[in-house]
Image: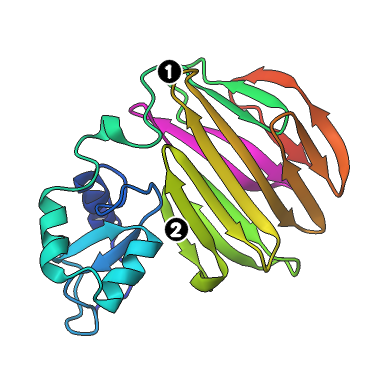
Amino acid sequence: MVSRHVPLAVRRELRQEANFGCAYCGTPLIQYHHIVPFSEEKHHDPERMIVLCPNCHSEADAGTIKRERLYEMKDSPYISDKVEHGFYFESSKPVIKYGGLWHKITNPNQKQASVLRIRGKDIITIYFEDNILTFDIAFYNAKGDQIAGVEKGDWWADTEKLWDMEYKKKALTLASRSHGLGLEIEYDTDEDLVNILGKFFYKNRLVELYTDRTVVNQSTILSNHATAGAGGVSVK
């Protein structure tokens, strides 16, 4: 019996095929769409699958984006080269700005860094490979249940309709009004700088990341610090 879980090798092939973004619109958060529906035939054939963002995935499921168009996008994805990816850096030493920290990646061999950790749990982790920035993000509700997440660009949520997602001009926004959570990531190409803003919850800690400070349960704990390497915001 074929599992609903898409194998790692297939996911990797599909991401590379579309240059790490939605094949239809370029959004850097993706899901795996079966052009030939899984309900019609239980398969994970990469020749009949495509990576789409949640919005385009829903439209494809509804038939708004036709199968023929999806096959066309497999051959000619929105991002024609990885250099066009929303978070592709010309520099090998980009700067990540979040929560009052200026985090400069000075080691070209550095593959990942923790941006935000709450009570020992990594909430935001960034990866920098082949000049492309990807990230892991974990969203939790007040009960401590994980309700959504990103794993190197792969997006999932327990209830999609509770989340708003927007991507334009190298800026990604995620928001859940019902849970009071959100994330903004914007790439300034002139400065080779990524700004990360957000609101996260984990084990009775409400953490808000602003450009110049980190606020925990409405109290500022950090403001305007520079760092390099793998340092990040850690909340106990």
Q: Which residue is drawn at the image coordinates 17% and 62% (left, top)?
A: 70
Name the residue located 26 percent from the left edge and 34 percent from the top edge: 82
Residue 90 vs residue 191: left or right? left
Magenta highlight on residue 118: yes
Asked if residue 113 is positioned above or below residue 69 in the image, the reply reads above
| Highlighted range, magenta | 112-135
Residue at disc 1, secondary structure: loop
Q: Is residue 165 magenta?
A: no
The single residue placed furthest to the right in the displayed view is: 219
Residue 117 falls in which quadrant of the image?
top right
* Disc with the residue nearer the chain's start (1 vs 2): 1
Name the image quarter holding residue 11: bottom left
Q: Secondary structure at mark 2?
A: strand
Residue indicated by mark 2 = 155
Q: Disc 2 marks which amino acid?
A: Trp
Q: Locate the N terminus by quadrant.
A: bottom left
On screen, residue 119 above or below 228: below
Q: Which residue is mark 1?
A: 108
Count of picture labels: 2
